[in-house]
Image (cartoon, coloured by chain):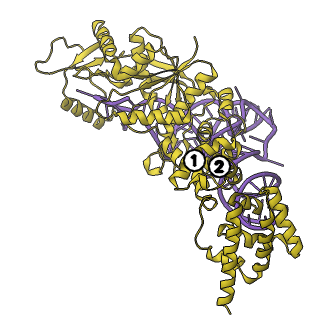
RNA sequence: GUCCCCAUCGUCUAGAGGCCUAGGACCCUAGCCUUUCACGCUAGUAACGGGGGUUCGAAUCCCCCUGGGGACGCCA
């Protein structure tokens, strides 16, 4: 039987990085084994599920390009089916109606906690046959009272638990709506899921789910419980750690290739390899190689990977993803160099697309004042001659390309018998307002001919004014 | 409290009894390259939680302790 995996988020928020990694693992395992990857929306909690969240999850999956083969299925579309299975269990005596009040249940739980035992439903209605007038019952699954439930987890190995630790869980509420541990079993069974990959917070749910499979006469799928993701401080990742939604990462200027690469290495490795393209992941990934230990999210490493992919991916692709960030920064890409050229120069100097946009403003817009320290150091009277000379030389350049520009600067330096620094630094400040920029030929190239000449003139005026002021 | 699970540099990890004087990567530091910044290159700091076993030999196997996490809902 070919592998069928599923990602089953509940739409009560955005797609967070932990969920995205689970989705990635499901997707990779399905792709690697040429199986199917199914998307299912677990929206049985009518109170908390929202259409916005559904959209947010779809947007996240779409951005990461984790395409699914079937679905999205919605559990709210399947209520008839759940009712049917509940009825079947009832008919077979594998489930029963429970009339206990929440108050009584709370009291029992408290007593048990105080007595130092695990809180569980005490089975009061287990053998009950008569209804309680005026009370709509819940339906409870009749869990086997003795024996062990065990399975070989694809990441954790063998896990076992005694049935005595389990109780009769509620599978349907008084209004008939089903609960999670039940719907998940019915769905995974109906959808032919062979491998359930999910967060390890579900380990404790697994034995009761296995019992339900067995009551239904179905073979449970295989399970792989992946460790969760921690924040940089080692605590469970949450909003107070900053960005947790994958869409936030998109908005912060990360490439999906980088996030995916980062996520796949969190809890999984292939020797010493750090960089993985999506294709390589599909080739090399295996759920069986995933670690058991929870991993902390390291923002710096993500940034490093993001820079790597900005440098490595075709500049056209990066440029396309840069566009929205330029717009967000109010930069008009029509007013300066072609985006792929910009990316080619800037990618190795920044870590995110936002930084790339912000640090490229001067190629599209004029800047105001020179940065004071840079101006003080480089736009001095001594810079006047080199600036004039380079202005003259550049005015002659018709082929405004890095090679020619580099030659023009070098020849000017040689003619003046000064080192490159004596001419490049003043020129850099003139062109960018600052003392840091790409190599001078590339800076000239990106700034463009007209703008370069005008900026040198402006710098010259600045130098003269300053000389005059100093007498 | 009860049950389940986890444990190698600050972080992500390699390691499946001798190849370990514990390797790689991020971060940090120094040097090189260089017209600045960055990239790149080189080097460096830094870890097997503790205690018992098993074995000729343990980061690797077993037990205990400690520490951490999860679950115990008519949430998913």
Q: Residue drawn at (44%, 29%), measured in percent from left and top?
A: A202
Given the image, what chain letter belongs to the residue carrying mark 2?
A: A
- From this viewpoint, is residue A109 visible? yes
Q: Foreground residue, A117 or A178?
A: A178
Q: Residue drawn at (74%, 83%), measured in percent from left and top?
A: A381
What residue is disc 1 on? A323
Q: Foreground residue, A95 or A450?
A: A450
Quadrant (top left, top right, bottom left, bottom right) of the N terminus of chain A: top right
Q: Residue drawn at (46%, 28%), measured in percent from left and top?
A: A203
**C-alpha gap between disc 1 and disc 2:** 8 Å
Mark 2: give few (<14), some (14-19) or many (20+) Cα within 10 Å.
Answer: some
What residue is disc 2 on? A339
Secondary structure of residue under mark 1 = helix
Counting residues from the N terminus, which is met first, the one under dot 1 or under dot 2? 1
Vertical order, A444 against A456 (above or below): above
Vertical order, A238 against A447 (above or below): above
Percent across and percent down for residue A416 are: 86, 75
Q: Which chain is purple?
A: B
Quadrant (top left, top right, bottom left, bottom right) of the C terminus of chain A: bottom right
Secondary structure of residue under mark 2 = helix
Percent across and percent down for residue A22 are: 52, 32
Picture quadrant of residue A117: top left
Vertical order, A275 against A393 (above or below): above
Given the image, what chain letter belongs to the residue carrying mark 1?
A: A
A349 on left or right of A403: left
């Amino acid at each position: 039987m070919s592998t069928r995996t599923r990602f089953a988020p509940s739409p009560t928020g955005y797609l967070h990085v932990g969920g995205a990694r689970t989705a990635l693992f499901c997707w990779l395992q399905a792709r690697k084994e040429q199986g199917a990857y199914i998307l299912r929306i677990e929206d049985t909690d009518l109170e908390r599920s929202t259409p916005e969240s559904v959209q947010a999850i779809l947007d996240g999956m779409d951005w990461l390009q984790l395409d699914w083969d079937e679905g999205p299925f919605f559990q709210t579309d399947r209520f008839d089916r759940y009712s049917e299975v509940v009825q079947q269990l009832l008919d077979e005596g594998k489930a029963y109606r429970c009339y206990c009040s929440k108050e009584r249940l709370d009291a029992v739980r408290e007593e048990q906690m105080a007595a130092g035992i695990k809180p569980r439903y005490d089975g009061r209605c287990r053998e009950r046959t008569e209804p309680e007038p005026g009370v709509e019952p819940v339906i409870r699954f009749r869990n086997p009272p003795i024996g062990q439930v065990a399975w070989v987890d694809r990441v954790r190995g063998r896990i076992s638990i005694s049935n005595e630790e389990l109780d009769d869980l509620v599978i349907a509420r008084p209004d008939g709506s089903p609960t999670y541990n039940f719907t998940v079993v019915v769905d995974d069974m109906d959808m032919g899921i062979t491998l359930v990959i999910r967060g390890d917070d579900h380990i404790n749910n697994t034995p009761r789910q296995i019992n339900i499979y067995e009551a239904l006469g179905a073979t449970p799928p295989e399970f792989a419980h992946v460790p969760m993701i921690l924040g940089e401080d080692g605590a469970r990742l949450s909003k107070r750690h900053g960005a947790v939604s994958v869409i936030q990462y998109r908005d912060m200027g990360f490439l999906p290739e980088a996030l995916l690469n980062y996520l796949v290495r969190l809890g999984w490795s292939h020797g010493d390899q750090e960089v993985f393209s999506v294709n390589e992941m599909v080739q090399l990934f295996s759920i069986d190689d995933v670690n058991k230990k929870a991993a902390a999210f390291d923002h710096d490493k993500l940034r490093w990977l993001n820079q790597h992919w900005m440098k490595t991916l075709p500049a056209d692709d990066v440029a396309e993803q840069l566009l929205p960030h330029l717009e967000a920064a109010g930069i008009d890409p029509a007013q300066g160099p072609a985006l792929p050229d910009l990316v080619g120069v800037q990618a190795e100097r920044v870590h995110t697309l936002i930084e790339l946009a912000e640090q490229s403003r001067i190629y599209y817009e004029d800047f105001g004042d020179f940065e004071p320290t840079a101006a003080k150091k480089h736009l001095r009277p001594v810079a006047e001659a080199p600036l004039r000379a380079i202005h003259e030389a550049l005015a002659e350049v018709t082929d405004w390309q890095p090679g020619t520009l580099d030659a023009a600067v070098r020849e000017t330096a040689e003619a003046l018998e000064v080192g490159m620094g004596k001419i490049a630094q003043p020129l850099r400040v003139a062109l960018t307002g600052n003392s840091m920029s790409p190599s001078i030929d590339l800076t000239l190239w990106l700034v463009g001919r007209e703008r370069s000449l005008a900026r040198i003139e402006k710098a010259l005026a600045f130098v003269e004014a300053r000389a005059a002021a100093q007498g």
